[in-house]
Image (cartoon, rainbow, N blue to C red):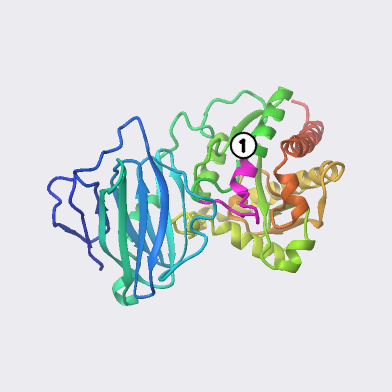
């Protein structure tokens, strides 16, 4: 098991101590700490060094306490910070150096930030410190990583912490998806994909999927609420990361009658990126409808890994419940297919669809036992025309109007086919 160091500073009693699970770094005594009401701001993040020793530096406006740990499968270094906002240049972290392939940053939860560094192999932390900046009032947070043997790395110093995170606390009463009170109206959960540290797809001009889908989700929520016919919930309303398991729990806790997950795709292959565009609606299937759908599900299911969590199934049905769950999912799958059909009918009147607009695969976020669910890929950020549309507020209103019309169509038919009481 690796061991780490704690740096000198405000954490009294830790001077020179060693810990086995993670490295805890406190701000230097000469640095100004962030107050409880004001978060620190990160203004620069830089990699230096080579494949034998790589350094990471984060410039902060005020001192904070940072926890650094490592994880395997894949190999990553995780830095947990309190409420830190990132004001970094576009493209920061996309290019690696030395032992680091790339890194990303953002909100991991409310008032909790995270930096995730993807490493080329197993590493250990050395010489972590947080010191007063030579110029100004800021703080410089640095640490080095060096290679280590896979045997000594094991599952990483954060394996125990990760185990605790899998069993998240019960949903707080003010959580937008956990309201127990029902209004008698159909409950619709709008799920803006990605968020916070997980940016999702990124266009050539640095337009982020997480921002696009949140904007469309808010517009869809506004339009659906304006009808007065639905009870609207959202999995996130700000730029914060929400794990796939939590999205499922939010939906179950709200008793949602319909789940709509919004995403935007991107293709890496130059030829495909210039030709493939349009919206696609995905439903759940254990066997993918085609290879592209399988790859899409694999990418979306890796969202938790991107944020420094485990992508394990975690919530597999036990044998006692498996038969009932299969029956429920079978009925839910039929309703999901009905809504997918309604979406295609309404979207194609106003929005460009992909060549094969209805596909299916094993998306974890669609594994809703009681809620009919679809995942809508609004378009391709890798295609110039789609990128322009996805960035347009007027297009957001247009696509939201089409989805709203599909929701109306779906529930009007469900109501008409329901037997009278």
Tell me if 5 is positioned left or right of 34 in this view: left
Q: Does residue 335 appear anywhere in the picture?
A: no
Q: Does residue 161 appear anywhere in the picture?
A: yes
Whether 50 is among the magenta residues is: no
Residue 129: x and y in percent read 25, 55
Residue 263: x and y in percent read 65, 49
Looking at the image, how many numbered discs can be counted on the residues? 1
- Asked if residue 261 is positioned above or below residue 256 in the image, the reply reads below
Residue at x 78%, y 31% (from the top left corner)? 415
**What residue did someone put label 1 on?**
256
Where, by quadrant of the figure, is residue 298 drawn? bottom right
Q: Main secondary structure of the magenta part?
A: loop
Using the image as rendered, state which of residue 213 and residue 294 is in the foreground.
Answer: 213
Residue at x 59%, y 26% (from the top left corner)? 182
Query: Which class describes the residues within 10 Å of circle 1: few (<14), some (14-19), or many (20+)?
Result: many
Q: Secondary structure at mark 1?
A: loop
Of all residues, the one furthest to the front in this rendering is 135
Of all residues, the one furthest to the right in this rendering is 349
Where, by quadrant of the figure, is residue 224 drawn? top right
Where, by quadrant of the figure, is residue 112 drawn? top left
Residue 82: x and y in percent read 35, 42
Using the image as rendered, state which of residue 305 and residue 255 is in the foreground.
Answer: 305
Using the image as rendered, state which of residue 280 and residue 337 is in the foreground.
Answer: 280
Position of the N terminus, as image quadrant, is: bottom left
Position of the C terminus, as image quadrant, is: top right
Residue at x 34%, y 29% (from the top left corner)? 37
Q: Which residues are magenta?
A: 198-214
Residue at x 53%, y 50% (from the top left corner)? 244
- Asked if residue 413 is positioned above or below residue 15 in the image, the reply reads above
Residue 200: x and y in percent read 58, 53
């Amino acid at each position: 098991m690796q061991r780490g160091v704690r740096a000198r500073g405000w954490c009294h009693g830790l001077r020179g101590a060693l810990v086995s699970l993670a490295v805890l770094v406190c701000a230097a005594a000469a640095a100004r700490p962030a107050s409880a009401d004001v978060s620190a701001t990160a203004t620069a993040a830089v990699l230096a060094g080579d494949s034998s020793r790589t350094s990471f530096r984060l410039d902060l406006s005020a001192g904070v306490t940072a926890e650094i740990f490592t994880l395997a499968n894949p190999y990553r270094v995780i830095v947990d910070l309190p409420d830190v906002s990132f004001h970094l240049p576009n493209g920061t972290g996309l290019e690696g150096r030395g032992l680091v392939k790339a890194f990303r940053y953002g909100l991991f939860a409310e008032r909790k930030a995270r930096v995730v560094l993807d490493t080329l192999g197993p590493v250990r932390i050395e010489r972590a410190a947080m010191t007063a900046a030579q110029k100004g009032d800021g703080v410089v947070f640095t640490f080095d990583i060096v290679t280590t043997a896979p045997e000594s790395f094991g599952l990483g110093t954060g394996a125990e912490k990760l185990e605790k995170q899998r069993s998240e606390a019960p949903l707080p009463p003010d959580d937008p998806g956990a309201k127990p009170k029902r209004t008698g109206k159909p409950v619709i959960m709008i799920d803006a994909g990605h968020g916070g540290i997980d940016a999702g797809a990124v266009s050539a001009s640095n337009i982020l999927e997480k921002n696009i889908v949140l904007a469309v989700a808010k517009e869809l929520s506004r339009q659906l609420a304006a009808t007065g016919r639905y009870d609207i919930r959202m999995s996130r309303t700000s730029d914060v990361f929400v794990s796939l398991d939590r999205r499922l729990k939010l939906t179950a806790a709200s008793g949602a009658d319909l789940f709509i997950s919004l995403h935007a795709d991107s293709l890496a292959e130059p030829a495909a990126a210039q030709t493939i565009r349009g919206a696609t609606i995905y439903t759940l299937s254990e066997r993918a409808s085609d290879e592209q759908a399988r790859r899409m599900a694999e990418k979306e299911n890796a969202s938790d890994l991107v944020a420094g969590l485990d992508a394990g199934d975690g919530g597999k049905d036990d044998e006692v419940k498996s038969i009932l769950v299969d029956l429920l999912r079978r009925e839910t799958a039929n309703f999901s297919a009905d809504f997918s059909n309604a979406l295609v009918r309404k979207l194609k009147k106003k929005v460009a669809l992909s060549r094969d607009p209805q596909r299916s695969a094993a998306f974890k976020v669609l594994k809703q036992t009681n809620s009919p669910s679809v995942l809508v890929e609004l378009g391709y950020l890798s295609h110039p025309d789609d990128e322009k549309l996805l960035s347009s507020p007027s297009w957001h209103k247009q696509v939201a109007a089409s989805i709203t019309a599909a929701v109306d169509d779906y529930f009007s038919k469900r109501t008409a086919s329901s037997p009278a009481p």
